[in-house]
Amino acid sequence: MPPVLGIYYDAQVQSAKMNYVKGLAWASLLLQAAGLDADAITAQYFGNDAPWYRDRIPLFESSASDIQDVYYYRWNIFRAHQRDLGADGYISTEFLNDVSWQTQPSAMLIDAANFHLREGRWCRDRRFKSDYASFLYGPYRNPYQFSESMADGVWQGYLVDGVADDATAHLDTMQEVFKGWNTTTMDRGGYDTSKALYWIQPLTDATEYTIASIDASGGADGFTGGNAFRPSINSYQYANALAIANLAKLLGQEDVANNYQQQADDIKKTVQDTLWNGTFEHFIDRYKVDNEYVTYWDFIRGRELVGYVPWTHDLPDDTEEFAQAWKHLLDSEKFAGAHGLRTNEPSYEYYMRQYRYEGDKRECQWNGPAWPYQTTQVLAALANLLDHYNTSAAANLVTKTDYTNLLQQYAKLHYNPDRGGILDLEEDYDADTGSPIVGLTRSPHYFHSGYVDLVLSGLVGIRPRADDVLEVNPLADPEVVSYFRAERILYHGHEIAVQWDANGDHYGTSGLVVEVDGKVVSTAPSLTRITTSITREAPPAINRPIAVSVQQNSTSYPQGSVSVADADTDAVHAAIDGRVWFFPESDVANGWDTPAGNGSELWYQISFESSTKTASAEIAFFANSTQGFDAPEKYSIQVNVSGEWAEVSNANYSSPVANGITRATWDGVDADKIRLVFAPQEEKKVRLVEFKVFGEVVAEN
């Protein structure tokens, strides 16, 4: 460069730097005005239960109000499905209430564990995902209950919080579980050495009534059977192998890392070589079963939505050939229903044929219905493709507009037309009408999918990384989303906020803004990729008070009893089962209901197996004026010591809260029984959702 041009160039660079610095300073001044009101937002969406959410969830605001409203509803689902198991910590449940096929006594089901962990990674309180991972890989694990990608879920959590000790704690058990899929003889899933692929029964893949299982029955059924080499389980094992390799690297275990990296590479190659069908231009099943209807190693006869799962876990190469799979997604004659994504195509002979019922009500099937489960996987896959599959994205078969539209379509699916349009996510849906199909008493507020992760890592575009870089690449369509702000996001120990305002009308400054610890670090005039260096700091330590009152299913102690004769034993148990929610629907009632108040005192008693220290309690009362429920006006705590009942000493009783948490503390005392004593208000019933007791003073939990 000539000297004069060099001086001119340097001057331009310095001017640009100064303008950039001035821009950051101006944006920082506007930051205070742009910040969201945590108290107001949590009160708006969660009412009296707002304190639980106040310091636990990232805040999100958007011009797309349906996406925003469902975002907070999904945190409500998350909270409702955190089951406290006492000394065994928290797990995430799939159904609000018990089902016959869950693992006892915890109520664990692992098929949606990856979603639970990916949602939980954004919770500012790391206890929930940390406890859940410890349970999934702990002494009560049940890793072959369904196909799973649990190790990947743990790794994905590490990418957000950066806490290596949490993630690597289960490395040995992860390897044991992975090897089990390779070596354990099972009739529902495993590894075929001759094909170097994993196979699974569709039911064990959590997807009963697929093309493979229906056709393997000759079209007669499809609930069981239909063992197949599927894109799903092979993608899960690919992701699990990579997670193990990456976690091993954190511990300096290079031999382990190399071993699992090689296994991942082998799975990737075999899936691409054998499960890609050039005719269908899609990843599809091959049969493992061989009978009078189907032949071993033949492809199934149609495309299924599960064929996008390889992209959920970044398995396929970025090629024009594989990109062709995405042209089917938006085709109304293939996967695109008016209200959701079909799990297979209308051209399939048994599309939407109903085989299974409970009484006269339809049961779960995957031969066409829209499932939030696979919708989550497809949106995560699409986010990956748009973010870093450059060749595939350049084919322009799917775009950011499609991501935004599909996310908005998915959000609308949460509004249940069969219940007056309330927010109530159920199991599966008719993709052409948007109505729930199953609608059983187990179905409301179902946690079998993800959404928060799709908003924060997709729409907002925080792309979690293992290195010391914060990367933001929003997939929001600016023509649809004129503004959004996500804040109070804990990332690598820092407070992160991402803001977009198309023209500055909403937040006072236009463009994309990224903040770290309250300071603007990067801006851009449009929705584009931004990367910035970030240090790694330790997030707040996990607070783990242990409830001594929780009775897991079918365990002898602790044991609940009440002062009312002939009480429903299941309802009495529900008040100490570690589950808390305040949904108003009567078919998901949670807790023990008293008779209407007549001035008499009632009690709920917990009996311990042996003398147990108690010092505080969290009490959850349900209220609904239409149903006649309200919190009592006052209450007290009594303990039984040496056969005598007495009120606890130096008690501090907070005022009773309806549809939230009421707290009580007292001088610690050892007792074999404890009671909550209260009088329902006149002609009002009390529903005791949970009476949770701790051996230490817990002021806030």
Image (cartoon, rainbow, N blue to C red):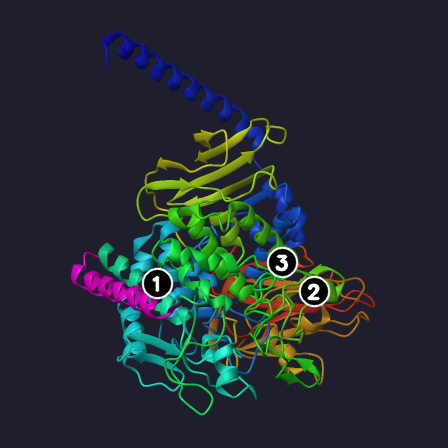
Front tag of 1 and 2? 2
Tell me residue 107's x, y (percent).
Answer: 51, 76
Q: Secondary structure at mark 2?
A: loop
Label at residue 239? 1
Circle 1 packing at 10 Å, graded few (<14), some (14-19), many (20+), is many
Q: Element at badge 3?
A: strand
* Residue 473 position in % (x across, y down): 45, 41
For disc 3, the marked residue is 662
Around disc 2, counting alpha carbons within 10 Å, would you say few (fewer than 14), some (14 to 19), or many (20 or more)? Answer: few
Q: Which residue is mark 2?
A: 433
> Real-space Cα distance between discs 3 and 1?
43 Å
Decide whether residue 635 is among the magenta residues: no
267 drawn magenta: yes
| The magenta segment | 251-276
Up the image or down, 218 lies above or below 424; here it is below
Pick out the residue farthest to the top.
4
For the residues bearing labels 3 and 2, Cβ distance under 8 angstroms: no
For this orientation, the residue located farthest to the front is 279
Q: Secondary structure at mark 1?
A: helix
Q: Is residue 16 left or right of residue 694?
A: left
Q: Are marks 1 and 2 in contact (CB under 8 Å)?
A: no
Separation of disc 1 and disc 2 at Cα? 34 Å
Three-letter code, disc 3: Thr
Callout 3 touching callout 1 (CB < 8 Å):
no
